[in-house]
Image: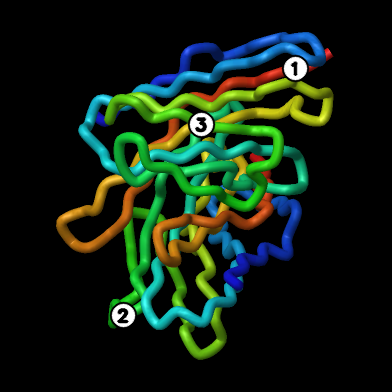
């Protein structure tokens, strides 16, 4: 089974703190993604990565950065957490299926609260 | 720009009835893929079904089928014989380039 794990299920941080969200996948996938999920807005892509040391901005990158030093690990960094970054954060990794399908596997999510 | 639209924020359906969840999309790419995911209250995202833009037949996976109408740019999910365990949030998504973008979701409630 593909496993995508995230370092914390719940996290509470103070405004201004630097926050690290870690994501690890064990299937040797090249592509990894960070989304945030908010009620009524669905999932919005923050950043993604094609390969080690490569990153691309998604739709809402402001206030975030990422790091991919190893293929299996993709970190999301909130340089200075703000209350509007309170959200559910979902990591995903993706492979290309034998039939040409694109199955994207998600981690369990980290619910971050910034106070 | 690519866009996914789910117009039904919530639906209530009687158990054992069939359900259709609507999804329309917009893209200028000739090659794209469409997905449906289920998110139960536990929070994990569960992949349900995929349809490629060049696939001739509609995708099916067990009780799930994707009603793909390319000319209308719609990719509705059909769940046959609904069960109580189908109660969840459902997201339609589209792959274009290397990103996957999601709709805002439909919350499905199955009534006993």
Residue B21: name its quadrant.
bottom right
Neighbours of disc 3 within 10 Å: few (<14), some (14-19), many (20+): many
Does any portion of residue B110 appear in the rendered image? Answer: no
Residue A45, above or below A88: below
Dot 2 falls on which chain?
B
Horizontal and vertical percent position of residue A71: 27, 30
| Disc assigned to residue B17 | none
Dot 3 falls on which chain?
A
Neighbours of disc 1 within 10 Å: few (<14), some (14-19), many (20+): some
Residue A72: name its quadrant.
top left
Element on which disc 3 rests: strand
Q: Are marks 2 and 3 on the same chain?
A: no
Q: CA distance from mark 2 to mark 1?
A: 42 Å
Depth check: A75 or B2 in front?
A75
Q: Quadrant of the N terminus of chain A?
A: top left
Tag 1 or tag 3, which sits nearer the N-term? 3
Q: Quadrant of the C terminus of chain A?
A: top right
Q: Report the residue at 45% width, 28% height from top.
A: A67
Q: Report the residue at 45% width, 79% height from top.
A: B29
Q: Which residue is mark 1?
A: A113
| Disc assigned to residue A66 | 3
Q: CA distance from mark 2 to mark 3?
A: 34 Å
Horizontal and vertical percent position of residue A93: 36, 38
| Disc assigned to residue B54 | 2
Q: Report the residue at 63% width, 52% height from top.
A: A59
- With A84 as the anchor, is A106 left or right in this view? left
- With A83 as the anchor, is A105 left or right in this view? left
Element on which disc 1 rests: strand
Element on which disc 2 rests: loop
Q: Report the residue at 46% width, 58% height from top.
A: B80
């Amino acid at each position: 089974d593909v496993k995508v794990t995230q370092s914390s299920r719940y996290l509470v941080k103070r405004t201004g703190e630097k926050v690290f969200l870690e994501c690890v996948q064990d299937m040797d996938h090249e592509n990894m993604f960070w989304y945030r999920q908010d009620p009524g807005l669905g999932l919005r892509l923050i950043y993604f990565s094609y390969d080690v040391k490569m990153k691309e901005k998604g739709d809402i990158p402001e206030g975030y950065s990422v790091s991919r030093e190893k293929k299996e690990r993709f970190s999301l960094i909130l340089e200075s957490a703000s209350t509007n970054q309170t959200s559910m954060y979902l990591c995903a990794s993706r492979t290309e299926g034998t039939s040409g399908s694109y199955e994207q596997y998600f981690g369990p999510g980290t619910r971050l609260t910034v106070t | 720009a690519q866009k996914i639209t789910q117009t039904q924020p919530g639906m209530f359906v009687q158990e054992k009835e069939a359900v259709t969840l609507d999804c329309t999309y917009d893209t200028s790419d000739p090659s794209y893929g469409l997905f449906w995911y289920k998110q139960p209250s536990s929070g994990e995202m569960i992949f349900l079904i995929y349809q490629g833009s060049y696939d001739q037949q509609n995708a099916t996976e067990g009780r799930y089928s994707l009603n793909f109408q390319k000319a209308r740019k719609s990719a509705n999910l059909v769940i046959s014989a609904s069960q109580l365990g189908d109660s969840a949030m459902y997201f339609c998504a589209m792959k274009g380039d290397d990103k996957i973008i999601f709709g805002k979701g439909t919350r499905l409630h199955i009534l006993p």
